[in-house]
Image (cartoon, helix red, strand yellow):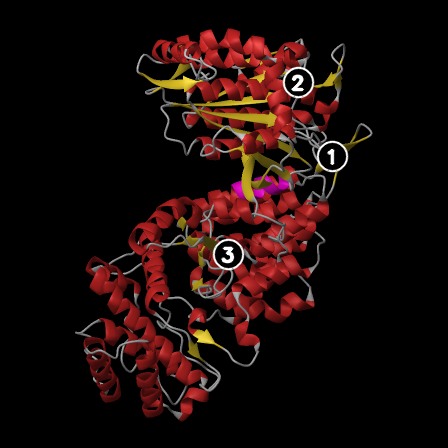
Amino acid sequence: MAPTPEQLAAWRSHLACAFPAVQAVFADCMQDAARVLSPAGMGAYLDAARALGKMGRGPEPVLALLQEWPQTAQTAGEDTLEAVTALLHTMQKSPNSGAMAPLLQTLCAVARRLQGADPLQHYLRIVQGVMHHTSVSIHGHHTTFASPGLPVLLRHAPRLLGAVSVAGLGRWADYGVRHYQHHPEHQRAYFSLDLADSRAVLQRERHGTLLADVENQLRLTLRVLWGSSAPLRAYATSLGETPNAAPWSTHHTADDSICLPDVYDTLPGAFPVSGLDRYRVALAHLAAHRRWSQPLVADNLSPLQRLTIECLEDARVDHLLLRQYPGLRPLLLAAHPQPIEGACNPLLSSCLRHRLVMLSRALLEPGHGYRDAALRDCVGHFHALLDGCESGTAAMQILAVQHAARTRCQSDQLADVFFEGTVVSYRDDNRHLWTFIEAGDEEDTFAQRRTTTEPQAPGLPPRHYPEWDATSQSYRPDWASVYEAVHPSGDAAVIDALLARHRGLARQLEQVLDRQKPQNRVRIRHQEEGSELDLDVAIESLIDWRAGAVPDPRILMHHRPDSRSIAVLVLLDLSQSLNDPVIGTGQTRLMLGQQAVALLAWAIDRLGDQFALAGFHSNTRHDVRYQHIKGFSESWGVQSKARLAALQARYSTRMGAALRHAAHYLGAQTADRKLLLLLTDGRPSDVDVPDDTTLLADARQAVLELAQSGLHSHCISLDPQADTYVHQIFGHHATVVDRVEQLPERLSRLFLQLTG
């Protein structure tokens, strides 16, 4: 019932607010509130509005509360008003009083997203937490300022809560206020989702199945079932009500890739489709297009004709897909909408999309039950073509043009398009299907757009790695960009000369190497250098010599292991400090490092272990360089030696990112034991990190990650002061070489101890 004039007068007197803007809407607000609030709730509602009016913050907070609270209370309960008013009083006493109106204006939308009193109170605690990170000490004085990100957070909260849980929103907000507490502009950009790490942290908290979590499974599916190694790329999906872009493929272009949404939620229905299954169906549909669809010339086709062709071609490749993998049928039907015939009124809106999705459903499901004559006739012709010889893309074009001409309506031109239940989410946007003779906007491909908006560094694209933040005890996702390349080559003879210089040490090591080899060994005969005499060959050479013939000098032999299963990756810190000279040697640390690694590579090669050599340096988190010197699949020969000879030291030491990237390659090996040896001369550091303890903590976390993956790591440090920090990173798995000139011998012997 509508409130009586007496009730309105009593409520107006209770409110005691003379703002004209409030008085103009007072009666309407009271009428809405009376329908949903109890008498006690009505009193608390008016008390809260009266208190806001007395705070001296203008009419906006009062108006927002009067208009938004009744619907909020209906969703979250009247009792939550106490928590809201407590937060408003806290705001009023702080520099954040300007955020009172934005909080109330979005409160109803937030409550609809959260659907409960407890989640709403959690949200209010998040807002209060963002407010509390607004203080800083300047010259010993404690100063408080308004939170720069709070108004932005409040404005975007309803949209964000459509994509993440309230707990996820809390973690995302906490990351922003911690990392950008002293950078107001950056904090505003973070809460506006304008920063890369903001989007990355939010992505980590998203609902549903992330492409990043299932990418390896999908790559394997694509390779095994379709024989394709096309790269999978993610594109960002919207966080609100805006429809998301469809998947696409850049087949027949220079940038051959498959683009899928970064996240898929479970598709509800009588037969729910999980996020992983949605990825599988979308990937199968795209792979079917890549195998069976042929490009068509689009210039002389109308939009209606092109939409109809795409509908029939999508259905055709789905049928071919089901012939090869019939077990996909339940998933395809569950992921395809089932529109109701007659749901769209052609007198009020354009029914083109509705007609086509009905046709698509009828083409997939024989028992569709639709009565439309044109639709049924098209379905009959479609199956006849599939059962015959003329069943390619060109045949679909002819049938589609005929069907479009038969079903075209004047109402198709109406601006109001009927979209309900017309999106087949697993199907792509069919950009690969069209070829344009005349240049136009339609030719804009993903690759072209990416070229113009995201300039790429030369060579391979970067691989992004998280970085550990010890303060918040969380990762900064996709923080460091690692660029990899094959190291330039120099003169391999330089390394041969270094090995010749250490020939005496090599002979000493050879005896140790023989003891390290497993008993199950393969004898390698006819060698000029070896560990023992090959008696049969030696006798034959002696006979030849006494007979006046040229004897065979290959009278030695050595053994290769046949059952040792070890993979080793030697990672070299190539930072600028390696150029420092070593007193009393006439050499730099880099030169001694080259000698040590050359001798170590020789020793590992003699043992027959899998091994790789790589180096790294960094110039901020955006430019970590990882250079391959020898790959696991390469032999220790001229090319590897030439790269080792050309080593150059420069820039800084972002150790954590390099360790993670090295683990990516070492973890892919099939050995029983995997060892990562790091040779460095200093603590982790980089020019964009003022406090080295930050990178020290990240390196320690990277070492823990390696251990959790079953990879053993050991650090050899050339820094005499390394004891103060290296054991914080590697624990007991670290060796400090005080006398750098002893490195060649110490490194090889250490390896033998670690792998004995």
Question: Magenta region, mostly helix, strand or loop?
Answer: helix
Q: Residue furthest left?
A: 367
Q: Residue at x 30, y 67 (%)?
A: 336
Q: Amino acid at mark 2?
A: Leu
Indicate the secondary structure of the residue bearing disc 2: helix
Q: Whole-percent x and y of residue 103?
A: 59, 53
634 above or below 355? above
Viewer can see residue 86: no
Label 1 to label 3: alpha-carbon separation: 35 Å
690 above or below 456? above
Residue pointed to by mark 1: 136
The residue segment tinted magenta is 171-177
271 above or below 750? below
Q: Whole-percent x and y of residue 69?
A: 52, 58
Q: Are marks 1 and 3 in contact (CB under 8 Å)?
A: no
Q: Residue furthest front?
A: 548
Residue pointed to by mark 3: 236
Name the side, left or right, on which 46 lies relative to 327.
right
Disc 3 residue crowd, few under 14, some 14–19, many 20+, Cα 10 Å: few
Q: 486 or 24, which is in the foreground?
A: 486
Q: Amino acid at mark 1?
A: Val
Residue pointed to by mark 2: 592
Label 2 to label 1: alpha-carbon separation: 48 Å
